[in-house]
Image (spheres, coloured by chain):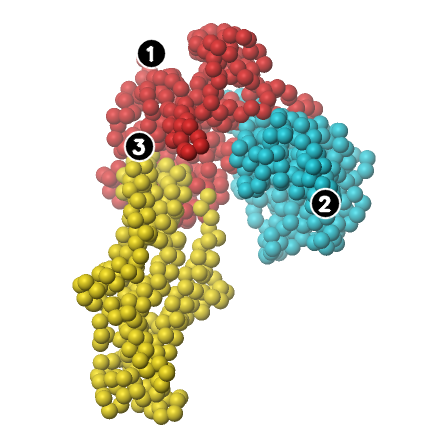
């Protein structure tokens, strides 16, 4: 197993607001790593920080960001441009706005390839057609000349995926790729990503808030809360033995069809996600945690509770089971 | 509101503020009468030029009237006309725009038709014609410009209303049992007012310029009112020998219009960050 | 039937006429096609379906935001089209999906919540204030929060405001259009629990629209599945989820990704053709995507059948 992406102690701030405080994770080649969390946890900012696409007032800092063994943290803008779209590709949530409405699908796809590799337009178009077929787009020749508004949401997302694969990347970062799609289309898109991952040996970093997607798709999971990765491990382990109170609370909140007892209240976590500013210390979840105590005002220690299963929490393992 | 770090906005606000204060108390402070002629003291240059006098800081015009006082009085006229015109055109344009944007269908078609008609009218020519036929007066200039300059208000009001009318809080107001008028007044107007404010400042600047142009052509504010445009027209004949007569009101006009535009731009920048989803 | 039906729809339809342009012929979009059902008082009708199914248009018709092109709706026996705006407001209220656009950003919370009372035009200011304070407390908000602007509240709190506004006139029916879809999952449950409590305490009837089947299963007493404007299946919640009959219902249920690792991804096999309400297929409108389609499905429109007392399904297989 070789790591495609290794992020160590990433921190991102926007002025006094700390959007990401401590994120560390590894994406292995041929595996899907999911970052799961709710709004405000910093997961999208993490993806942007890796690609160095933060807004102007965003500052990132990390111990290391290694991509395929190379340290891209120190890369200049020029060097990052060569990596983005080429060896590291990203697909976004809103297929409506990720494609430029003024250009045809074909021109947007070929642009990616021609920017990074010197190819002729014909060769680029052929690759685009081949990829569109691979991702299940019918009549690809015709699609080349179509504009984004002529395609449905599912089709647009497939175009995004094909576009991301144009230069044969090693890593695909997908930020909520199916949230805006219907549930019947969602399963298809996720299957497609899984197949491509197998075929091409891609590493996928999938960002989502949906635990269902995480359970079915991820090989490895990192749970983020208020800018920190508070628990991470292999999917089966995490769901079998969720340790951090937030992880447990989150899983409790998700109703499972077929296992619903009508009339019984759904699990919920009281309170709201805090915005972390300069000077904050201790565990960010303590204000909502049923097990919080004095010691939680100090930064939570990193504890290993199984092979490849890590949690940041003060609670002793036995205590968390109560 | 724009933050005080927005240099353009602050400068613009300072200029407009200064002109406003000068217009209100200035003519009273100078000790001269803007209309008092003194044919013995004609065309005295401003104090910094040769032949200038400390009695008349900006000199006198061709009829011996104190230029500074006339200038400050002219500021009153410019501001007065600018604001009154915009109040009139703003009311007309906003009402039309909101009605059209809110109801859509035939009413919107009618509003669009009116806007298109208005846009095909050459404003300056019509204003000239009206004043030419009826005769120049302050009220006429204000009314004519007010009845002509409403198009930008209408367009902006209509566009912003259309963006808002399908938002859920408007739907909720319908479901709460509000009448269309209540919805337009309470739900729509407060949310488009920031955009309209930007249009206001730009239209005031435009109205001031237009009035000056009309007065320059002799078909605006009647003499002896010291409209800056009129002062420029009167100074035209002395342009080469007593250049200050034409330059001073010219600079004043330029500065005020610049100030209003800077304020408008600053407002636009500040409100532009509020995206209507 | 001793109970008065809270909501009755008879062949309710809505067709939009899209004007043709120079290059496009005029189109007729049948967003909702003859929907009929009866909802008893105290029940919760869950409406599920994907984009283009017409559930939002149906909700808007019930709320009075959209005029039906044909058909009728009755609330507790009264014809909806005959009610004036104030009477309708006393009977039916909405809770919308987006907590950010359903509250006027320029108004204070207490004014937003009091709006339905003011619009009635007959309440005294003290009465308005009293009722507003009471409903705010009931949904878990303080009077201090009542003085704030929407931008100062979180998504979950804003949705509570929307619920308070909906309930202040003590309506009979509340139409919830995806009330928790825009909220974080940890907050969703808070809102759903609140809605459940309020329904029991105030004896309300809900129409609950959602694309999240698990939430619908939790909340609804009966479920209606819509596809391209038609109701293709209807049943009690328990029966529908245990024994879905229509192939589309089966596909929907199969597509749900439960947080159970190791089960992999379902292959629903529906294809990527999006349902297009302006171009409804002939015969059974689901046939182009149906795995169990037979030759007759392309030509003959199925008629609704009732395999059991509370069930309805529109499919040639039944």
- Give the farthest residue toward the bottom: B51
What residue is shown with label 3? C89
Q: Are marks 2 and 1 on the same chain?
A: no
The secondary structure type at the circle numbered 1 is: loop
Q: Position of residue C309 (x, y in %)?
A: 43, 8
3 or 1: tag closer to the N-terminus: 1
Q: Is residue A204 visible?
A: no
User: Alpha-carbon distance for marks 3 and 1?
Assistant: 27 Å
Q: Does the CB distance between marks 3 and 1 fall below 8 Å?
A: no
Frontmost residue, B222 versus A272: B222
What residue is shown with label 1? C1
Visual hue assigned to chain C: red
* Image quadrant where residue B32 sits: bottom left
The secondary structure type at the circle numbered 2 is: helix
Residue drawn at the location 42% of the way across and 34% of the way down: C22
Of badges 2 and 1, nearer the viewer stands 2
Of badges 3 and 1, nearer the viewer stands 3
Q: Position of residue B152 (x, y in %)?
A: 35, 53
What is the total number of numbered labels drawn onto the structure image?
3
Q: Is residue C125 left or right of residue C22?
A: left
Q: Are marks 3 and 2 on the same chain?
A: no
Q: Is residue A96 visible?
A: yes
The chain containing the residue under callout 1 comes to C
Of all chains in the rendering, the one displayed in cyan is: A
Of badges 3 and 2, nearer the viewer stands 2
Q: Is residue A221 left or right of residue C248?
A: right
- Give the farthest residue toward the left: B134
C43 lies above or below A25:
above
Q: Residues within 10 Å of mark 1 (few under 14, many from 20)?
A: few
Of all chains in the rendering, the one displayed in yellow is: B
C9 lies above or below C128:
above
**Mark drawn on residue A116:** 2
């Amino acid at each position: 197993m070789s790591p495609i992406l290794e992020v160590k102690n990433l921190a991102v701030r926007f002025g006094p607001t700390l959007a990401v405080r401590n994120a560390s994770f590894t994406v292995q080649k041929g595996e899907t790593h999911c970052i799961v969390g709710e709004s405000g946890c910093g997961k999208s900012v993490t993806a942007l920080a890796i690609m160095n696409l933060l807004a102007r007032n965003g500052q990132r800092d990390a111990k290391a960001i290694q991509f395929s063994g190379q340290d891209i943290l120190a890369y200049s803008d020029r060097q990052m441009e060569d990596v983005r779209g080429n060896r590291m590709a990203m697909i976004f949530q809103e297929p409506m706005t990720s494609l430029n409405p003024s250009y045809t699908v074909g021109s947007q796809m070929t642009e990616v390839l021609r920017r990074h590799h010197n190819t002729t337009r014909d060769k680029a178009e052929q690759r685009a057609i081949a990829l569109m077929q691979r991702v299940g787009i019918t009549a690809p020749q015709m699609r080349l000349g179509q504009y984004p508004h002529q395609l449905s949401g599912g089709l647009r997302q497939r175009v995004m995926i094909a576009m991301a694969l144009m230069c044969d990347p090693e890593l695909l970062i997908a930020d909520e790729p199916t949230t805006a799609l219907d549930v019947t289309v969602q399963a298809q898109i996720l299957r497609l990503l899984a197949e491509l991952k197998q075929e091409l040996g891609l590493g996928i970093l999938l960002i989502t808030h949906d635990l269902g997607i995480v359970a079915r798709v991820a090989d490895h999971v990192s749970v983020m809360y208020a800018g920190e990765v508070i628990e991470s491990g292999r999917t089966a382990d995490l769901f079998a033995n969720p340790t951090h109170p937030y992880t447990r609370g989150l899983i409790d909140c998700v109703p499972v069809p077929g296992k619903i007892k009508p009339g019984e209240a759904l699990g919920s976590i009281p309170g709201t996600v805090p915005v972390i500013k300069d000077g904050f210390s201790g565990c960010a979840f303590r204000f909502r945690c049923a097990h919080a105590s004095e010691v939680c005002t100090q930064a939570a220690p990193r504890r290993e509770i199984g092979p490849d299963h890590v949690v940041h929490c003060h609670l002793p393992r036995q205590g968390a089971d109560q | 509101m724009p933050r005080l770090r927005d240099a353009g906005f602050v400068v613009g606000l300072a200029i407009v503020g200064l002109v406003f204060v000068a217009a209100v108390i200035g003519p009273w402070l100078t000790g001269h009468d803007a209309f008092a002629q003194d044919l013995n003291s004609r065309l005295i240059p401003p104090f910094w030029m040769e032949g200038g006098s400390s009695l008349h800081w900006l000199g006198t015009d061709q009829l011996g009237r104190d230029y500074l006082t006339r200038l400050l009085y002219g500021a009153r006229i410019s501001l007065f006309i600018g604001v009154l015109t915009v109040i009139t055109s703003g009311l007309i344009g906003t009402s039309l725009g909101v009605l059209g944007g809110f109801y859509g269908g035939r009413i919107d078609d009618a509003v669009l038709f009116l806007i298109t008609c208005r846009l095909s009218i050459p404003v300056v020519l019509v204003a000239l014609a009206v004043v030419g036929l009826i005769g120049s007066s302050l009220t006429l200039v204000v009314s004519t410009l007010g009845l002509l300059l409403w198009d930008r208000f209408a367009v902006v009001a209509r566009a912003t209303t259309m963006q808002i009318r399908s938002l859920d809080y408007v739907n909720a107001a319908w479901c709460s049992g509000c009448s269309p008028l209540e919805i337009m007044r309470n739900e729509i107007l407060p949310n488009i007012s920031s955009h309209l404010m930007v249009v206001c400042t730009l239209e005031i600047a435009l109205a001031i310029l237009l009035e000056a142009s009309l007065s320059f052509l002799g078909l605006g504010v009647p003499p002896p009112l010291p409209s800056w445009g009129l002062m420029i027209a009167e100074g035209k004949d002395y342009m080469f020998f007593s250049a200050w007569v034409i330059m001073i009101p010219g600079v004043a006009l330029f500065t005020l219009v610049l100030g209003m535009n800077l304020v408008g731009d600053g407002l636009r920048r500040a409100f532009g960050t509020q995206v209507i989803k | 039937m001793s109970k008065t039906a809270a909501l009755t729809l008879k062949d309710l339809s809505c067709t939009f006429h899209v004007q043709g342009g120079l290059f496009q012929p005029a189109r007729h979009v049948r967003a909702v096609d003859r929907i009929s059902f009866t909802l008893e008082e105290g029940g919760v009708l869950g409406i599920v379906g994907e984009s283009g199914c017409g559930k939002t248009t149906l909700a808007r018709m019930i709320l009075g935001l959209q005029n039906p092109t044909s058909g009728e709706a009755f609330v507790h026996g009264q014809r909806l089209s005959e009610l004036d705006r104030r009477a309708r407001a006393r009977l039916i209220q909405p809770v919308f999906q987006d907590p950010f656009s359903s509250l006027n950003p320029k108004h204070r919370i207490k004014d937003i919540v009091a709006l339905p009372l003011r619009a009635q035009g007959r309440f005294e200011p003290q009465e308005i204030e009293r009722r507003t304070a009471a409903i705010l407390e009931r949904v878990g908000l303080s009077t201090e929060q009542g003085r704030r602007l929407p931008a100062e509240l979180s998504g979950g709190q804003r949705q509570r405001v929307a619920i308070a506004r909906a309930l202040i006139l003590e309506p009979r029916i509340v139409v919830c259009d995806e009330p928790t879809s825009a909220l974080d999952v940890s907050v969703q449950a808070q809102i759903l629990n609140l809605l459940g409590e309020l329904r029991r305490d105030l004896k309300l009837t809900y129409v609950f629209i959602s694309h999240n089947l698990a939430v619908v299963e939790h909340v609804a007493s009966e479920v209606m599945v819509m596809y391209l404007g038609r109701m293709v299946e209807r049943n009690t919640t328990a029966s529908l989820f245990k024994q879905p009959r229509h192939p589309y219902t089966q596909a929907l249920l199969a597509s749900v990704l439960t947080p159970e690792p190791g089960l992999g991804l379902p292959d629903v096999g529906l294809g990527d053709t999006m349902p297009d309400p302006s171009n409804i297929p002939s015969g059974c409108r689901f046939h182009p995507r149906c795995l169990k389609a037979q030759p007759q499905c392309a030509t003959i429109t199925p008629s609704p059948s009732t395999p059991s007392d509370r069930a309805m399904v529109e499919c040639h297989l039944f």
